[in-house]
Structure formats: structure tokens, C-alpha cells
Image: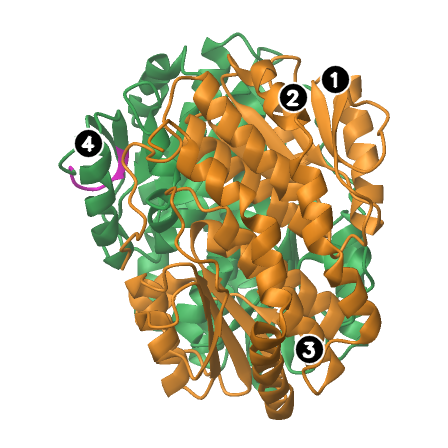
Chain colours: A green, B orange
Amino acid sequence: MSERGHGMATDIAEQPAGFARLLEDGPSAAIAEVAAEVARRKPRHVLFVGRGTSDHAALYGAYLTEIRLGLPVASSSPSAITLYGARPDLTGTLVVGVSQSGGSPDLTGVMAVARETGALTLAVTNNPGSPLAEAAELSIDVASGHERAVAATKTYTAELLALLMLVEGIRAGDGALPADERAALARLPELAEQTLADPAAAELAQRYRFASSIVTTGRGYAYPTARETALKLMETSYVPSLAFSGADLQHGPLAMADPDVPVLAVVGEGPGGQSMRDVVARLGERRADVVTIGATDVPGASARLAVPAVDERHSPLLDILPLQQLALALSLARGEDPDSPRGLKKVTATL
Amino acid sequence: MSERGHGMATDIAEQPAGFARLLEDGPSAAIAEVAAEVARRKPRHVLFVGRGTSDHAALYGAYLTEIRLGLPVASSSPSAITLYGARPDLTGTLVVGVSQSGGSPDLTGVMAVARETGALTLAVTNNPGSPLAEAAELSIDVASGHERAVAATKTYTAELLALLMLVEGIRAGDGALPADERAALARLPELAEQTLADPAAAELAQRYRFASSIVTTGRGYAYPTARETALKLMETSYVPSLAFSGADLQHGPLAMADPDVPVLAVVGEGPGGQSMRDVVARLGERRADVVTIGATDVPGASARLAVPAVDERHSPLLDILPLQQLALALSLARGEDPDSPRGLKKVTATL
């Protein structure tokens, strides 16, 4: 019960059930209703705000919005509004605040300003009674239940799935998911279970026992996964971890790549993964130690964490699972306590 | 002539002259003309695209846009457009592509799509004959001359100043800078000269000779400086460097902070700097080694790189100077060649 890492391990293991829960009739219908209302209001832009892990879920939402809805994504730094008093005109903009706790004062502040300045506001949280949810006009509950560890895992994937259901529901117009999307998502809990059953990620942790830093990379839909992996490694194992989009990696940070800096590259089955293959090849030429996360082997990489082959758009919900397991195992291998990282609290109050 | 680091040192030293050149009548008038045209077209949103160093200049432009113009900033990932074929409706949007070479195919692709879909397009480059400048309707030449080192320094600060002059010109309406802004900017070349004359940054490099990673942080206007510093350190010294906004640092990465991970914190005189003081205090409590960049001492920090006290909005043009010197000196101290980082080329072709 109180063994080190029990909380995070339990959170991680609950993700297939978390997917299944959001896909049940009740929660699905609640998200569909929000999606239908958003579609009815016809936003011309979408602005996502989030911090930490939830910012990575928001980034996934941003890719979905651009690619699936064809809507421009706005990017507001909360500090412009909360510190410098900026009051951008947000008429016609959907502002989505993503936060597991719903308790960050800066996000709540942005949400309140957004609502005042004419935006349609939506909170995506694991706490429907939170200040963020109260401040927003619409609200989605990701229904993950209590998260034991400070490092977020199951709330992250629940946020991803909720945002996916939201965007696909908006795309459909009436909020309801098309039959093929429903069918693809219905397989998620089982695929997640299958992915988590693989012991490879925990075994791989040994490889990084003495790494002084780790680079993560991915492109397109996989970039949020790279970002979230780096944050998980830092939160639980205190190993400096740098996330780069595959494109940015070639603009400078590539110089850092050498056999002493391990690289975790998310290489899916789609345009983002295709463009990552060149990046992995270049890293391989530099004798970097590259481990890929994906469904097929990639030339230049020395090992692979296997995940099921699904549409690249759905991959972020599965790709992160072995990487969470890796962060947990690495933390334990380094003698740390992944449930209670030093210096961190569950709700972070930034102004 | 061919001594190691001569190119980067020369580029760095040319920055005061670069500021002076952009502020001369001819280049000023050219930027004012572009600003007046933008103001006339009344964009409702601004979207910045850039990669690497130029993306950090673009980020500065984004803060200026939100705070000084009150316009929402859009954020498009080039990959959504170039890899996934997204075609967001950009009517009424000003799309600003920032690139020193103007040669990145992905940015040029985004620019072409933006122009097709109704956006007002503007290229900010150091190469007015480049594909990016050709693809855009409007163009600003930052006129930095040939950059010797692969790691960009003088083109970065020239991009910052050009974007500042652009935004303030749009704010004025007719493109011309108000008298007080002109007066403040007129002092820049001398202040930059004075900042670069201080040997403190080069001396500080010794402190990081054996650092296995470095954290950089800043908030608001100072956040682009933190990002650019991290990139410079990685490009020239291959030391993994992690940039966090002061807010994000408290959401996870703070766990990493300990006496072995040095922190460079940009703490200016304004709301962003004020909010950083709490972050530095928290880092100090965790016995992190914090060096600040700013005009006044900050409790919790162990040393400071001095920069002149100017409006926080103008600070990014000066704060980066000692940090470039630090990157150069650290690279030399580690026996590397800052002019030609391994694995990098001046123009990076990402698709």
C-alpha cells in the first residue's frame, strides 16, 4: 500500500478503465452536448490554455483543431493577460482551459477575462466544482477519479480522450461521433490494456539509470507525447529531459546529439511519423542512442517500445503509456519516490 | 582570423552597430511603411511562424502583439499545414514569418498557404531575396549583414528590434514611432555597447565548465530570452539546457532543482520580473545555484549579470547580450568550436 511508486503505478494501470468510462453513454453524451453547443456557436478560432501536463493535452487539442476542424488556433500566454493586463478581443473565439485540478489562479483569471471579452469559454477538468469550471460557460468532466501520485498520468490521457471526443463531435456538427470514430475509440481500452501489459518499458529503465539527460522528440500529433514524456522524466526521476519537435531538433539542438545523450523518438504511422524517420536516421549517423516508440522498426534506432498500430490521430492516447511506465521504473531504479516528487504540490498556484 | 570563436565573437560585437543601422532613417522608414500598411489593413489576429532562434524572436513579437496591440496571437504549427494538409481560414490574419535565412521550406510553405487563404503575409528576414520574402506580400529586411557563426546572435537581436519597431509602428497607426519610443530606442546602441564591455559573462563561464545541464527561466517578455539562451548553450557548448517560463517551472520541473543544476534566471524591472522574484526565492530554498540577469539584485540568487535598467519591453534586446557571451566563453572553455557546431548547417531544411 505504501510501497514506493504504488500510487503512480495504480494511476497508470487505471487508464484503460478511464478510457472505457469516458466512452460510456453518460459521459459521452455530456461531451457530445458540449460539442453540439460549440458547433452551434460556430467559433472562428480556438485558444487553449493549460500548464504543465495539461498544457500538453491542450497542445494535442490544438493539433486536432487545426487539422480536423480547419480552425486557426490562438495562443495566449496567460502572463500577457494576468501580468501585463492585455485584453485581446476574443469575440468569436472558443477558449478552452485544460487543468486536472481546475485550481490554477492564472488559468481561472484568463478564463474570466476571456468570458468578459466575448469568448465562448470551456473548462476541461477532473474537478467539475473547481474555480476554473465555475468561471467557464461550458465544462467537461474527464471523470478520472482521485489521482494518487503528484505526477499526472491518468488525468492526462483522460484529457486527451475528452478533447478528441470534443473535436470530433464539433466536426460532426451535432456532437455525436461518427460510427467509424466510435468503433476506433471502442477498441482503445483493450489496446491500452495490451500496451500496459508489455514489460519492455520497465526493463528499458535500466538503460537510463546513469543518463545525465534525455532528449525526447516527435512531430505533429506525436509532439505532445514528447513534451509530456520529458516532463514525466523530470518530475519523477529528476533527469533533465529536453523535448523537441523533430523539426526544431534539426535547428540547433542536434549539435548536442552524441552517444551519451539518449533519445526517445515517437514515430507513428502517418505524416508526422514519416517525417521523423529522417530525423532518426540523422541521429543514427551521429551515433546517438535512439529508442523509438511506435508500431514498426525505424532504421537508425537501437530499440523500440512497441505500441499498437492505430491512426496517428489516436496514437497519443497509447504512445504515452509505456513512457509513463518508463518514468516510474526509472524513478524507482534511481531510488526516488515517484508518488511524491520533491518540491512539488498537486495544485500549483501561479499568478 | 581563424582562431576558434572569432566568428561568433565578431557577430556578437556587431550588435550595437546593428541596432544603430536599423534605427537609421532609411531602414526605419521601410519598417514604418510596412507598419502603416499593416495598420491600414486592420488585421484581427496575428500568427507568427519561425524555427529555432527566429522562433524566439517570433515569441517576443507575440508578447508585443498581445500586450501592445491587444490583438490575439494565433499559433499554427507548420506541421499541421505542411504535413497534415490543414487549411485554416486565415482571412483577417496577419501572418509573420521570421527567419534569418528566409530559406526554410516549411515556413515558405506556410506563407504560401497563408497568402492563398486570405492572410496578409509578412516576412522578417536577413535576406530580402529569399524564398520566404518572395512568398510574402510584405517584407522587412533586418539588414544584419553576413553572419559568420552558425549560431545566430546578431540576426536574433536585429529581428527583435525590427519586430519591436513594427509593432510600435502599427500601434501608432501611421507606422511612425512616437517620440518617447524613438528616444528610448536611440539609446539602445550605446547601452548594448556598455553591456558588452562588461567581462562578467565571460568570467562566469568557468562556473559552468562541468555542469551536466543548465536551466534557464524568465517570464513574460523575458521568456524568449530564456529560450534563446538555452538554445545558444546547446548549440555551442552541447550542454543540455532547459528553458521554462517561471510559471511552468513550478509545475513539475522544480523537482529537478538542486545544487547540481545551475539556473540562469532573467529578472527584469516590471511585472514579469516581479513574478520571477518568488520563483528565485523558491529555487534558493531548494539550494539551487541561481544567477540572475537584470539590473538589480534578487534575494535567493548567488550572482548577477548586470544589464542596464530599461523598460521590460526593451529588455530582451539587452539581456541576451551577456548570455551570448556566456555561451561563447563556455564553448571555448570546453574546447569546442562555437563557430561551427557539429552536425549543424546555417540553413536547415525542414519540411
Can you identify the residue that label 3 sits on?
B169
Distance Cα–Cα, label 3 vs label 4 = 47 Å
* Residue A30: quarter of image: bottom right
Where residue A345 sits: x, y (%)? 73, 30
Gap in Å between the C-alphas at discs 2 and 1? Answer: 7 Å
What chain does badge 3 belong to? B
Residue matched to label 4: A284
Q: Which residue of the protein is positioned furthest toward the top in this rendering?
A: A335
Query: Hey, which residue is sitting farthest front in the picture?
Result: B1
Q: Are marks 1 and 4 on the same chain?
A: no
Q: Is residue A331 left or right of residue B110?
A: right
In the image, the segment drawn in magenta is A292-297
Given this view, does label 3 or label 1 mark the residue nearer the observer? Answer: 3
**Marks 2 and 4 on same chain:** no
Identify the element where label 3 is drawn. helix
- Mark 1 belongs to which amino acid? Arg
B104 or A330, which lies in front? B104
Determine the CA span between mark 3 and mark 2: 42 Å
Quarter of the image holding residue A120? bottom right
User: Label 1, on which residue?
Assistant: B286
